[in-house]
Amino acid sequence: MDVISNLLKILSDFVADLIRSILGFSPFLADLVTMGLAAVVLITFAALSFMGLTYVERKVVARIQDRVGPNQAGPFGLLQPLADGIKMFTKEDTTPASADRWVYNLAPLVIAVFALASFAVIPLAPGVVGTDLNVGVFYLLAIGSGSIIAILMAGWGSNNKYALLGAFRTVAQLVGYEVPMLLNIIAVVLIAGSMSLIDIINHQTLADGNPGIPHIVYLPLAALVFLISGIAETARSPFDLLEAESEIVAGFHVEYSGMKFALFFLGEYVNALAVSLVFTVLFLGGYAGPILPPYVWMLLKAAVVIFIFMWLRGTLPRVRIDQMHALNWKFLVPMSTVNLILVMIAVKLFPTSEAAARAFGGILVTPAAQALILFTLNIIVLLVSLSLASRAARKQRLAEAELLERRRAANMAAVAP
Amino acid sequence: MTIQQVVFAVLAVAVIGAALFVVTTGNLFRGALMLILVFFGMAGFYVLLDNGLFAVAQVMIYIGAISILIIFAVMLTRGMQAMIPRNAQATGAAVAAAALFVAIFLAFGPLRLTVDFSAVPVLSALFRTETARTLGDVPWQYANQPVPETYIADFGRALVNINQYLLPFLLIAFLVDAVLAGAVHLARQRKPAELIAERREIAEEEAEEAAALRGAASPEPLPQGAMAATTTQDH
Amino acid sequence: MQNVINGIPLWWYLFVAAALFCIGLYGVLARKNAIAMLMGVELMLNSVNLNLLAFWRYLAPGSQAGLAFAAFIFVVAAAETAVGLALIISAYRSLRSVDPEKLDQLKF
């Protein structure tokens, strides 16, 4: 049992030992080789899950829309990703005549690199993590902004109106939705007391390794907003207007073909996978779980989050660009800010550690009691902001209806003899 | 030659090369991309200085915000792409910058070229001190200790400590608030009536100016063309 | 050697920072495009930050002065870019130019 649950850790230690002792490398060189190997393994994992995800997504969306999905290549269409890969490889690689060649060719590479870089800090099992940064959460947010640059490069480099429009839309969306994401991550960091992803998981685990209270119980509202902004950050439906096929052809990657297009595709799926893994770490307790080995728990939880993404994609229509920005700036950001301030106050008033209670005063409570307080607070904020939003929406609807009525009356009066 | 030295050398060459490209190129979009490379190199330097927090903050603020703003500005002022990259004082500026660099290098580099102020007539009067002050002879005291594990927490506490940096921190917060308000003001959706009135005003002024230039005695009434020209911008 | 950390003496950082500062200075003085001038300013601010953090690491890693100033420079640089670019774009809308030499009217 122990061997199975620590399989990844044992394997990585074995490889590290092998390199260090048997091959007789110097410690520094051994570290370098081990890190390189780890990077290769992580990237392979990401790329393989990209292939798997395309298949699963097509199957799931097909089920939701009452279709069968890919079923020709191999049993159950399982070889479909391979067929897609071969198709991508054999496509002609085109470059627009008036493109900025360097920028155009560099953009897919940059987006793939930044998408893969986020895997460096995500812990997959105890002891199995690229590097345990003490600013891990911050690092993830910073890396996320790199893909914006790549999108701008693609949009500008293609020298195409639709591509540039798509790039503008994308940047407005990604920059905007970074704000609620950040605000809600800060709430998690506040209650966990650390920016390291491993510390955040440990805060959701009991001392004996069993799962404790996951952060989604502490902060249901933060989890919800994080999920919404995560979908927007990865530009998935219903926030996929940067590549709205029916409006601006395909957005910033309209000019790309063959493997370069595949790299954009990879970046998109790997980002979605990274967001679901981060959501798992921040809110669902990461790899903590009973009976099953930790890496299985990690992947299971992430799979559930990814399934929610696909479910939303299969069922929701695309939002309009003004609706999307209004949702972000007029609803999510104010609500998250208020929520964050309340969480700050509550965490200071009801600390769980004795040292904090002694240093700043406040009532010492157990984690369960703190979770209950924060849960209630979150639900109250959510209900209040929802009722405010619905009141504002009703007002606007009535005003619009009145305007329409007045216009209709004016038209009738003009037509009448 | 340790690995850190190699990394430093690579970063230094990349940063300085990219910076030179930024200030000499005519293609501003590529210049902005090279500026991003400079920012990345700075983040690398911060990692070498054992300061992961600032490295990540550098990536987040400079690459996530500032360079995107700059790229947007370059895109929005696309008509300026064909501009000559240098102005008339470029040669003088190059000489001045190079001279400054050489001066800094001689004074603070490994050579430590010292100038005794007390020997120079004017400077000795300015620096009236007991000991002979020499340029470049800076008494730096190397701490020679590792960065404390808790430097992020210490830094955070220093920012909200009234005896340390609370006041500048609040001032910075005010600055950001003011900038935010200014940005909202600039980007605010103006009412159509307001816009039309403003454009009419501008059109009237332009018409007056044009009339004055032509030497016509009476300013025309609001010309139809001016309004048409201004309304085409409305999208 | 006392002043060497990770095999790098302090003056290497100062050298790079000085070079960046002078390149940025040249950019500000010699460019004809206001956005390019702003890029030069960014280079100079970055070099100052590198200097501050290098001194923090080598001379006083236990104190917060260097960190605080560097952080304030981050914020000021972001604010300056936002306002500067807004001004440049609004000037471009009126004058169809971003050449600072053409911005010679008090009202436009």
Image (cartoon, helix red, strand yellow):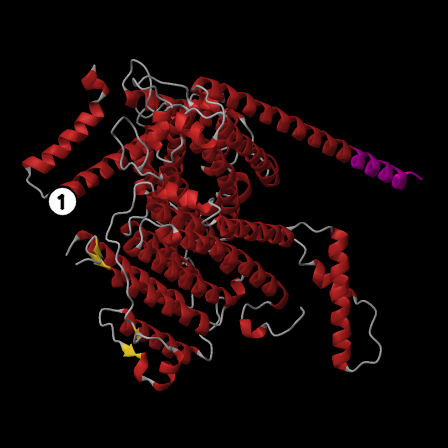
Residue reaching furthest front? B130
- Secondary structure mostly seen in the magenta stretch: helix
Looking at the image, residue A7 sits to the left or right of residue A384; the answer is left
User: How far from the left and from the top, in percent, is residue A218?
Assistant: 47, 23
Q: Type of residue at label 1?
A: Leu
Residue drawn at 77 percent across, 58 percent down: B197
Against B45, is A245 above or below? above
Question: Does the image show residue A92?
Answer: no
Which segment is the magenta one?
A402-417
Which quadrant of the view contains residue A87? Answer: top left
Outermost residue on the right side: it is: A417
**Looking at the image, which is closer to me, A306 or C106?**
C106
Of the pair A34 and B200, the residue shown nearer to us: A34
Q: Secondary structure at mark 1?
A: helix
Residue A415 within the magenta-colored segment of the rendering? yes
Q: Position of residue B125 (x, y in %)?
A: 39, 82
Quadrant where the image shows the N terminus of chain C = bottom left
Label 1 sits on residue: A29
- Front residue of this view, candidates B211 and A120: A120
The chain containing the residue under callout 1 comes to A
In the rendered image, residue B10, in percent from the top left (x then y), is placed at: 24, 58
